[in-house]
Image: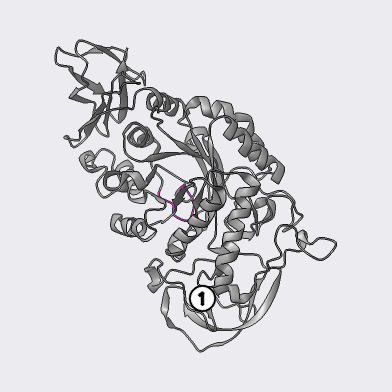
């Protein structure tokens, strides 16, 4: 069986137009994306959010409404209709591209009715010590999904209605409209085996789903099976997993894989810049899912801000990519880290080619390319200071296509690493039986760089695939050469 260097794309960013065109767009571009070297697409949440046709998808309202019902002010989602989504999934798969759905299981928002329930108030930043006595609150917790009601009174796809007892907390009381408060319902506890920030970080937003409820566990399992039957996706990107009991996911994954009768790819978003925490989480879910390599993203962010004063020898230190590569999904940027978003920590444009070379051309990790880095993006939004800012993210498609080509044809076999200079680092890939041509990658975050590296090919000419350096290089009789790159740049040397 031939080796496949898989690479996924996050096929959206926070500010893609709310014109219902995304599903049709990716459907049209499926062949082009496959030819470029992408083997998987992570698509945004396909179900109806609280904001209807304007909702990015993370303010989940109805997970059974894939853009089919007139609910929350629209029929389609921000990205299109159910039929367009299913068509796009089928076209991608027909072109050899796996599809990963975005699973937002942690919360629900935009309830159809309120319910009065006893609850204990906690400060947002302290989930261990109540700020007051238990009292009645008026909470948005009853989800009836009127758009799915059939003439006989039943509901299409699922009759399940959410009530307050399916949640453990909310952050809004219609009676008092008090801010900075989380209300823990009577008889409930915040979920266990979650992140320990704020004392217990089970509560994130909206009506927080209670995973210690057997009814909830069964409903989330039923929905997962339904989703697989409807869409045929190949796996899930799971949102906000640090807020959900870790012990639930192996049960859920087992049930879904038995139902689908195939292995499903799973990657979780555990947003925390600490390797030990991510390792603990992977162990907690019995290795059943990968995690996004958040520490690697922050290394890229800090290096890009340092302007050549970052020790590139340490660029992979403290990362999943270095320590547990089989469970690492590597990325440079995403919808949460992009400018003006909640976890804003952008990687500066000049450094992105270096960062992408590291995730796409080394052997470790499963790389993910961000839509806005590939196609570019322009938008404006309010910053934390209340002012509005125009943002332009430049397309890196030209260089990314070069990297994708190199990944597809040259990034195989033994890897020799030369992380031995403050600014200039490099590595070589020697190829394998099916891909015998060698490759050398060299980059510098400071001045132009030179490095002697071994490629295992004697007296062989190499050229710079990136076209940054025009003059070829020829190895010596022992298969070594002094490869070079320009300052603040990366060059990818491959056999002529």
Query: What is the number of callouts on the image?
Result: 1
Give the percent coordinates (x, y) of residue 226: 63, 54
Residue at the image position 32 percent from the left and 39 percent from the top: 364
**Which residue is pictured at 41% across the width and 53% down the height?**
288
Judge by depth and name the residue closer to the eye, 78 or 167: 167
The quarter in which the N terminus is drawn is top left
Question: As displayed, is residue 373 above or below residue 289?
Answer: above
Q: Position of residue 451 (x, y in %)?
A: 18, 25
190 in the magenta segment: no
- Is 344 inside the magenta-drawn segment? yes
Coordinates of residue 273 in the picture (x, y in percent): 34, 55
Element class at badge 1: strand
Residue 385 visible to the viewer: yes
Q: Residue furthest left?
A: 478
Instruction: Tell which of 17 and 221 is nearer to you.
Output: 221
Most common secondary structure along the magenta stretch: loop
Residue 5, image quadrant: top left
- Quarter of the figure that contains the C terminus: top left
The quarter of the picture where residue 446 lies is top left
Tell me the crowding category of disc 1: few under 14, some 14 to 19, or many 20 or more residues within 10 angstroms, Cα based: many
Name the spot of residue 491 as percent of width and height, x first: 31, 24
Image position of 302 (left or right of 422): right
Residue behind mark 1: 182
Determine whether, in the image, residue 290 is placed left or right of residue 23.
left
319 in relation to 170, above or below:
above
Residue at 28% over, 43% down: 306
Point out the stretch of residues depicted in magenta.
338-345
Q: How is the image coloured?
A: one colour
């Amino acid at each position: 069986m031939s080796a496949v260097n898989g690479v996924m794309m996050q096929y959206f960013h926070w500010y893609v137009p709310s014109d219902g065109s995304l599903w049709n767009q990716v459907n049209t571009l499926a062949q082009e994306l496959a030819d470029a070297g992408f083997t998987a697409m992570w698509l945004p949440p396909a179900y109806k959010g609280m904001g209807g046709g304007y909702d990015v998808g993370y303010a989940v309202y109805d997970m059974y409404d894939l853009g089919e019902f007139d609910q929350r002010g629209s029929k389609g989602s921000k990205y299109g209709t159910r039929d367009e989504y299913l068509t796009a999934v089928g076209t991608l798969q027909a072109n050899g591209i796996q599809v990963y759905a975005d699973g937002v299981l942690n919360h629900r928002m935009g309830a159809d009715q309120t319910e009065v329930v006893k609850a204990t108030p906690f400060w947002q930043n302290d989930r261990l010590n109540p700020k007051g006595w238990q009292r009645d609150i008026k909470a948005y917790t009853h989800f009836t999904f009127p758009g799915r009601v059939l003439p006989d009174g039943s509901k299409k796809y699922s009759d399940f209605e959410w009530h307050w007892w399916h949640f453990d907390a909310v952050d809004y009381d219609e009676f008092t409209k008090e801010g900075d408060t989380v209300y823990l319902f009577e008889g409930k506890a915040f979920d266990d085996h979650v992140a320990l920030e704020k004392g217990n970080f089970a509560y994130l937003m909206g009506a927080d789903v209670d995973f210690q409820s057997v009814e909830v566990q069964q409903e989330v399992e039923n929905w997962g099976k339904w989703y697989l039957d409807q869409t045929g996706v190949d796996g899930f990107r799971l949102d906000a997993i640090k807020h959900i009991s870790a012990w639930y996911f192996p049960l859920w994954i087992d049930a879904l894989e038995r139902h689908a009768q195939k292995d499903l790819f799973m990657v979780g978003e555990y947003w925390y810049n600490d390797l030990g925490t991510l390792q603990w989480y992977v162990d907690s879910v019995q290795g059943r899912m990968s995690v996004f390599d958040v520490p690697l993203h922050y290394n890229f962010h800090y290096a890009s801000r340092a302007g050549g004063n970052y020790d590139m020898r340490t660029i992979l230190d403290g990362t999943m990519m270095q320590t547990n590569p089989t469970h690492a999904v590597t990325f440079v940027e995403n919808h949460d880290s992009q400018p003006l978003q909640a976890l804003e920590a952008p990687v500066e444009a000049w450094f992105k080619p270096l960062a992408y070379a590291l995730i796409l051309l080394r052997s470790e990790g499963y790389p993910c390319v961000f839509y806005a880095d590939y196609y570019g993006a322009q938008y404006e939004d309010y910053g934390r200071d209340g002012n509005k800012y125009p943002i332009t993210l430049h397309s890196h498609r030209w260089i990314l296509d070069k990297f994708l080509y190199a990944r597809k044809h040259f990034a195989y076999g033994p890897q020799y690493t030369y992380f031995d200079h403050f600014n200039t680092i490099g590595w070589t890939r020697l190829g394998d039986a099916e891909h015998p041509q060698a490759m050398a990658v060299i980059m510098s975050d400071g001045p132009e760089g030179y490095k002697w590296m071994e490629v295992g090919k004697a007296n062989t000419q190499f050229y710079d695939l990136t076209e940054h350096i025009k003059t070829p290089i020829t190895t010596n009789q022992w298969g070594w050469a002094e490869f070079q790159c320009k300052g603040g740049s990366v060059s990818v040397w491959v056999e002529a």
